[in-house]
Image: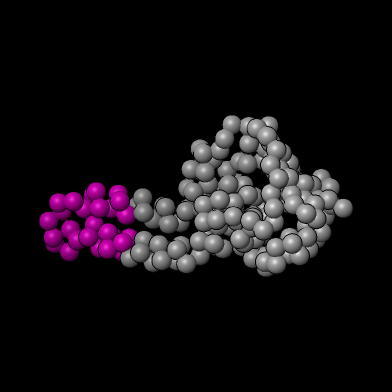
Amino acid sequence: MPVQIQTRYDQRALTAMARGLRKTVRRKHSRRSHIFGWLVLILALFLGLMPLLGEPPEVNGLTLAVAAVLLGTLLFEDAVNGFFARRKLLPGTEESTATFTGEHYITRTRAGETTWPYENIQAIAEGRRYLVLAFSKRHAQAFDKEGLTQGSLEELRALLAERTGLPIVKI
């Protein structure tokens, strides 16, 4: 029996999609970037607070502003990536209906219909509300578990595990 899911690609869905990519196919790259980012943040805070130690306050305001932006980016990375992904959405793809069958799955939007083979999926992530299928380090699809209109979540999990041979990573 096919499983059908309706998804609205809003900020919440795109944030979940970015998080799914970060926790699966981008895991190593993300870890290195976070280490580098936190080191730069510590250095920027140290340099920005040097006037408190008696050093001349030449660029401390700018340095502290850069540190604040860097801190915000590190803490809200998935939301920032979701924001930029939302800006790249093609017109007519804001809402999607996906039908999962044994051979492939089909997504339908106002822009068109696409058939996807399961072999293209590199990783599967599942959050509280969304199931994310990652195709590459930059491409994924999110599916709203609350949007199930046909079939069950257990059937979908079993189908994906069987057809892809991949584990479902909890995020």
The C terminus sits in image quarter: bottom right
Region rendered in magenta:
40-67
- Left or right, 147 with reference to 124: right
Q: Residue at x 30, y 51 (%)?
A: 66
- Residue 60 placement (x, y as % from top left): 21, 53
Of residue 54 and residue 153, the one placed in the foreground of this image is 153
State the image coordinates of residue 36 (x, y, percent, origin top left).
Answer: 35, 64
Q: Which one is in front, 169 or 52?
A: 169
View extreme (right): residue: 1
Q: Give the residue displayed 64% in from the left and 65% down from the top.
A: 169
Kindly tell me whether residue 72 is visible in this rendering: yes
Residue at 23% from the left image edge and 49% from the top image edge: 61
Percent across and percent down for residue 109 are: 69, 36
Residue 146 shows in the view: no
Colouring method of the image = one colour
Report the magenta stretch's main SS: helix
Does the segment drawn in magenta span residue 45?
yes
Judge whether 126 appears above or below 85 on screen.
below
Q: Is residue 70 magenta?
A: no
User: Is 86 positioned to the left or the right of 131 in the image?
Assistant: left
Kindly indicate the quadrant of the structure image that contains residue 112. Answer: top right
In terms of depth relative to the viewer, which is nearer, 131 or 107? 107
Residue 44: horizontal and vertical position, in percent? Answer: 27, 59
